[in-house]
Each structure stands twice: as structure tokens, then as C-alpha cells.
Image (spheres, rainbow, N blue to C red):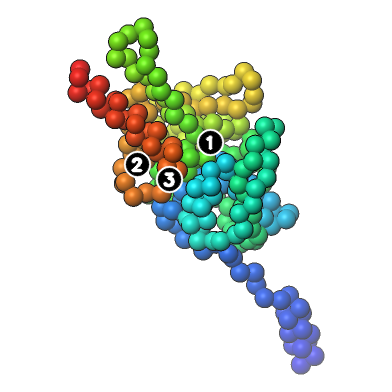
Amino acid sequence: MACFLIQKLIMNKRGPKPKGKVKIRWSAGFAYAIGLIATDGNVSKERSLVTFVSKDLEQIENFNKCLNINPKIGRHKSGSTDELAYRVQFGDVIFIKFLIEIGITPAKSKTLGQVIIPTEYFFDFLRGVIDGDGYVHSYFDPRWRSSFLWYLGFCSASLGFLSWIRSELRTRLNVEGHVTVSKRSSCMQLKYAKREASVIVRQLYMNKNVISLSRKRLKINKILAIVDKLAKMN
């Protein structure tokens, strides 16, 4: 009897189990948010905090919507440029444990590799990666008439992460791409040009209703409109 009372007292001292703020259930929006965390997020196991920063308020609002959370949106100076950016931060021990289990660890910038994503949500995750640290760049080459060049790129300090994305896209879409290393920083880029870039973005935005960063999506739509127009002319 005495042993039973002692065990009950110890269990009571443990307190209630922590409740997660984020409902962990895979969906297109949830996978998109994971892509944002993999690029522009920060995970602190010691402080039990998830932080997400963006210069786009829409990006912050999309992030909150996809995770169904409502933390206070703050402003702070970002990086060495001292530009003001938006930031949300929240504590969730259970969600942090989940992130670590799928491959998004604290101090992830140079150690990030494969992220465990259900196959049906890979491109939703990749759209989050594009909106986080991706870019599109286009121009008409003045040397040849109607020669339109454009590129889709993923930036990361982790070669392992870019290599994993490249491998997945090679398997899924039969595109090759190439990795370059910046001479000015430790950032590496996985680049796709013209036809391969078109194949990828058409897959990313196949559904017009998917969540995304509107300014980046608008830029991609304008590029695709030029590509389609030139294809009809040739």
C-alpha cells in the first residue's frame, strides 16, 4: 500500500503531459510549412522554440495558416543588412521532436539533408522551399532574337540538402540540374534552366489553388506566359 502511494505521488509531481500547439497531420499546407521551416525557420531544442522569419508579411500569414497557429507577429532586424523582417516564434516540444525526427534539426543550416516527407506531398514541401530560399531569374539574350533564358534555383549552405532535392527531382521528373558554389559566400545553388525549370514549376503549381507566395508565383506565371508565347511563334 505504501509503495502504491509513493508511486502515485511521483506520478502527480510529473504534471500534465505537454500539449502541442501544432496539429501534426500531413496535408498540402502542412508540407508547405515544413518547406518554409527547412529554409527560413529555426529550431531550438534547448529553448523549445520554433522561429520563422520573412520579409514578406504574406509569407508569415501563410505559415501561420498552414500550421493553424496564431502567434504574435513581431519585427526585427534581419542579418547583416539590418533590414526589418517579420518574425513569429512559439514553443511546442512535441512539434520540435517531430521536426527533428523528420530531419530538421537545430543548427540545421549546414547539416540539413534528406527530409522525410510523404511522397504525395513532396512538391508541396518543395514549393515551400522555393518560397523560402528559392529564386527565379529571366532575361532576353541580346545576341539572339527571341532568345529567352530563365533559371529556377534553390539556395542552401548544405550540399546534402541540395543533393537530396536533386536526386528526388531526377527520379520524379527526369531533370538533371547542376550545383554551383558562390565565390562570395558559403551558399550553394541547385539550378535548373529553361525546359527543366518549366517542367518543375508546372508541377509545383499544377493546382491553381495551392498556397504560395503571390509575388513569386506571379513572377513565375509571367515567365511561363513568355515561354508559351515563344513556343507558338517557333
Q: Classify mark 2: helix, strand or loop.
A: loop
Quadrant (top left/top right/bottom left/bottom right) for the C terminus: top left
Q: Position of residue 2 (x, y in %)?
A: 80, 90
Q: Quadrant of residue 173?
A: top left
Q: Are marks 3 and 2 in contact (CB under 8 Å)?
A: yes
**Structural distance between the alpha carbons of marks 3 and 2:** 9 Å
Q: Position of residue 180 (x, y in %)?
A: 53, 21
* Extreme-bottom residue of the structure: 1
Residue at x 20%, y 19% (from the top left corner):
233
* Residue that carries the numbered disc 1 in the rendered image: 133
**Structural distance between the alpha carbons of marks 1 and 2:** 17 Å
Q: Earlier in the sequence, mark 3 or mark 2?
A: 2
Q: Position of residue 215 (x, y in %)?
A: 44, 39
Residue at x 53%, y 27% (from the top left corner):
189
Query: Label 3 sits on what residue type?
Result: Ser
* Residue that carries the numbered disc 3 in the rendered image: 212
Q: Quadrant of residue 4?
A: bottom right
Asked whether the viewer can see residue 55, the reply is yes
Q: Earlier in the sequence, mark 3 or mark 1?
A: 1
Q: Position of residue 111 (x, y in %)?
A: 63, 38
User: Can you say whether 108 is above or below 45 in the image?
Assistant: above
Residue at x 60%, y 27% (from the top left corner):
187
Residue at x 51%, y 63% (from the top left corner):
23
Residue 218 relative to residue 100: left or right: left
Disc 1 crowd, CA 10 A, few/some/many (<14, 14-19, 20+): some
User: Can you say whether 120 is above or below 215 in the image?
Assistant: below
Q: Earlier in the sequence, mark 1 or mark 2?
A: 1
Residue nearer the viewer, 2 or 44: 44
* Residue that carries the numbered disc 2 in the rendered image: 205
**Structural distance between the alpha carbons of marks 3 and 1:** 13 Å
